[in-house]
Amino acid sequence: MGEICLVSVGAVDPPLLEYLALILGETLHCSTRLEPKRLPPDPFYDPMRRQYYSTRIVELLSNDYGRKEEKVLGVAEVDLFIPILTFVFGEAQLGGRAALLSITRLRQTFYGLPEEPERLYHRAEKEALHELGHTLGLVHCPDYACVMHFSNSIEEVDLKGDRFCVRCARSVRT
Ligand SMILES: [Zn+2]
Ligand SMILES: [Zn+2]
């Protein structure tokens, strides 16, 4: 694994980005940096859905952000969608360089509950690792404890672990 460039998609809480940069570097044994240039998500807003088109943002991240040798991880505060789904927590290019996650639905406040910053950070860490795992060529994993397990709801995000299982970790290395 080479380097990871984190991009703020719109305004995102800087301490969260700094936490992700730190924890991803440690977990994936690579260097990370925060890209000073933000990606404004406004052109990707769908007024009918009141959400942002994830796939287009991933394309822009891939084409215009980061250095050639870097993986690019966009972090968005806005809610994301792809046309066939009501929402996505994130999206990534399988075996490619760009990944994206939204923290909107990782916040307890989205579900009418009081904010829990530690829980939010842990969820964001899992989803960031998950999407970056896709850029490393990993597909969804049947192991419930593996961070590459597919999560369709916030309960499933909480249930899965925050690391690659042995099998996924092995296939990342090779
Ligand atoms: Zn996935
Ligand atoms: Zn796995």
Image (cartoon, rainbow, N blue to C red):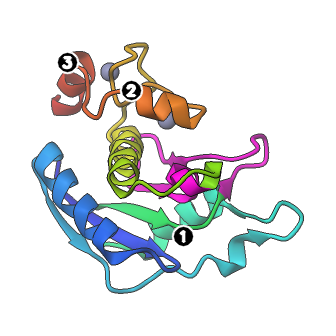
Residue found 40% across the figure and 39% down from its top: 134
Q: Magenta segment, which residues?
A: 80-109
Identify the element where label 3 is drawn. helix
> From mark 1 to mark 3, how far is it between C-alphas?
33 Å
Q: Is residue 114 in sight in this rendering? A: yes
> From mark 2 to mark 1, how far is it between C-alphas?
30 Å
* Label 2 vs 1, first from the N-terminus: 1
Q: Is residue 92 magenta?
A: yes
Kindly check if marks 1 and 3 are in contact, taking CB atoms under 8 A apart as contact. no
The residue beneath circle 1 is 60
The crowding category of the residue bearing disc 2, from other C-alpha atoms within 10 Å (few below 14, some 14 to 19, many at least 20), is some
Asked if residue 37 is positioned above or below residue 87 in the image, the reply reads below
The yes-or-no answer for disc 1 within 8 Å of ligand 1 is no
The yes-or-no answer for disc 3 within 8 Å of ligand 2 is yes
* Label 1 vs 3, first from the N-terminus: 1
The residue beneath circle 3 is 166
Pick the quarter of the image with the C terminus. top left
Residue 147, which numbered label? Answer: none
> From mark 3 to mark 2, how far is it between C-alphas?
15 Å
Residue 95 in the image: state x and y as whole percent: 39, 41
The residue beneath circle 2 is 160
Is 76 on the left-hand or right-hand side of 13? right
Q: Amino acid at mark 3?
A: Val
Residue 111 in the image: state x and y as whole percent: 63, 48
